[in-house]
Image (cartoon, grey):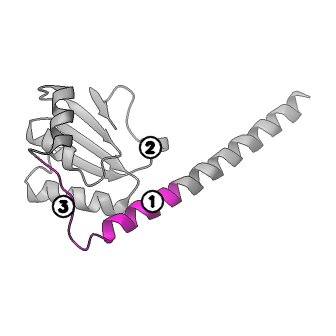
Amino acid sequence: MKRYTLIMLWGVVRQMDKRILERQNIERTYHNLKQKNKNGKNDKIIGNSKVYEFYRKLLGDVEGLKILDFGCGNGWFGIELARSGNYVWGIDISDESIKHASMWAKKDGLEEMAHFSNMAGESLNFDDNFFDLVLG
């Protein structure tokens, strides 16, 4: 009976893995198309936007932290945090978004402070307790 239970559980896990991959593919396709449809006009929101002000008030002054920007999109907030002296690792499922984030980090001279990777949230490649702060 235990063997049957284990086989059933393995089947459930495999089915969940398949559903996660399907969801990730749908999400990746959506965000890639969203970035491509901007025709070079990207929504890098910085400085005085209400969204930026909200997050900055929420965080307060932070400097010298290792920060994970989970679902970083085009990297606008991670770049601002890097500009403030933090080390930022931004991850997003959209390779188009990561391409834009990396481009802006390079353009702003922040390649050493802001790192962007195409990565799904379900399979992070970081050591435990690596980050001081996780945003998402």
Q: What residue is disc 3 on?
A: 103
Q: Which residue range is magenta in the image?
A: 24-46
* Nearer the observer, 101 or 3: 101
Q: What residue is disc 1 on?
A: 28
Residue 69 lies left or right of residue 30; in this view the side is left
Disc 1 residue type (three-letter) = Arg
Q: Earlier in the sequence, mark 3 or mark 1?
A: 1
Measured as percent of width and height from the top left, residue 26 is found at: 52, 60
Residue 130 lies left or right of residue 3; in this view the side is left
Q: Is residue 9 above or below residue 45?
A: above
Residue 100: name its quadrant: bottom left
Q: What residue is disc 2 on?
A: 121
For label 3, the SS is helix
Cα separation, mark 2 vs mark 1, equals: 12 Å
For the residues carrying marks 2 and 1, which lies nearer the camera in this image?
1
Disc 3 residue type (three-letter) = Met
In the image, farthest residue toward the bottom: 39
Cα separation, mark 3 vs mark 1, equals: 19 Å
Measured as percent of width and height from the top left, residue 17 is found at: 63, 47
Residue under the point 84% across and 32% down = 5
For the residues carrying marks 3 and 1, which lies nearer the camera in this image?
1
Residue under the point 30% across and 52% down = 73
Measured as percent of width and height from the top left, residue 67 is found at: 25, 34
